[in-house]
Amino acid sequence: MNKVLVMLAKGFEEVEALTVADYLRRTGIEVNMVSTGKDLQVEGAHGIKVVCDITVEDIKEPLNYRGVFIPGGLPGATNLRDDARVIDLVRTLADGGKMIASICAGPIVLCKAGVIDGKKVTSYPGFARDLVGAVYKEDLVVRDGNIITSRGPATAVYLAMEMIKYLQGEEKLRELRKAILLDLVNEKKRG
């Protein structure tokens, strides 16, 4: 099954969550947006309300998913970090060798789950001190095995690209880059 979970708690960063979900779906990955609350609707850090597909309670077979994505945003990331169900889910998927992706403040969830010890990671500037046990990098996107992390809202596109490369391979990545004009943007920046 080619399915990925996108975890949303009140106060999530909208750009990060929706960019990743949208681009994954464009390449044929089934994305389940997951509410950690009782309702399917979750309000982001900037007041945008998103209707999720399922709640965290609906996840019965986590290893049927290829991975999980933890967006940043505050207090969204701290709400995810403080939710034992989310921590258990991240641990289960990591132990199963599944993709664990996160951005911005989201890697604090990975730290609490204990899945980044000795791993290269990045985050929003200022969160490095919270990622105890990890090898901190300041690259836009950092991949260490099945762990993929990124810096913040402006790097969400590049995080999604790395996730697609990991999940779908180079050909799907090339197709998406062309479809969203990313190569054109990069070409214009160089010119």
Image (cartoon, grey):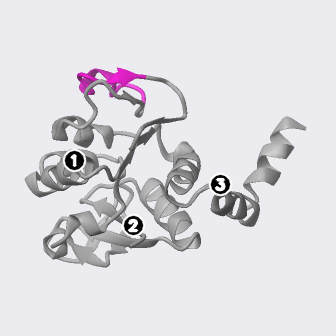
Return the residue at label 3.
Answer: 170
- Image quarter where the N terminus lies is bottom left
In the displayed structure, does residue 114 sit left or right of residue 100? left
Q: Residue at x 18, y 53 (%)?
A: 92
Which residue is rendered at x = 54% and y = 74% of the image?
Answer: 28
Q: Looking at the image, is 123 positioned above or below residue 7?
A: above
Residue nearest the viewer, comparing 82 with 24 = 24
Q: Which residue is mark 1?
A: 95
Q: Nearer the viewer, residue 113 or 125?
A: 113
Image coordinates of residue 99 in percent, x first then y, are 37, 51
Q: N-terminal of the two: label 1 or label 2?
A: 2
Question: What's under tag 2, amino acid-wise?
Answer: Ile
Residue segment shown in magenta: 125-136
115 over 1 or under it: above or below: above
Q: Which residue is mark 2?
A: 48
Contact between marks 1 and 3 (CB within 8 A): the answer is no
Mark 2 crowdedness (10 Å alpha carbons): few <14, some 14-19, many ≥20: few
The image shows residue 124 at horizontal and vertical percentages of 41, 33
Q: Secondary structure at mark 1?
A: helix
* Mark 3, secondary structure of its residue: helix
How far apart, in angstroms, are the residues tagged by discs 1 and 3? 26 Å
Mark 1 or 2, closer to the camera: 1
- Say if the magenta span includes residue 103: no
Estimate the x, y position of residue 66 in percent, counting from the top left. Answer: 36, 61
Q: Nearer the viewer, mark 3 or mark 2?
A: 3
Q: In this rendering, would 139 be left or right of 8?
A: right
Q: Residue at x 17, y 55 (%)?
A: 86
Name the mark on residue 107. none
What amino acid is found at the position of numbered circle 1 in the picture? Answer: Asp
**Residue type, mark 3 in image:** Glu
The structure residue drawn at horizontal position 15% and vertical position 49%, both measured from the top left corner, is 87
Question: As rendered, which of 112 and 62 lies closer to the eye?
Answer: 62
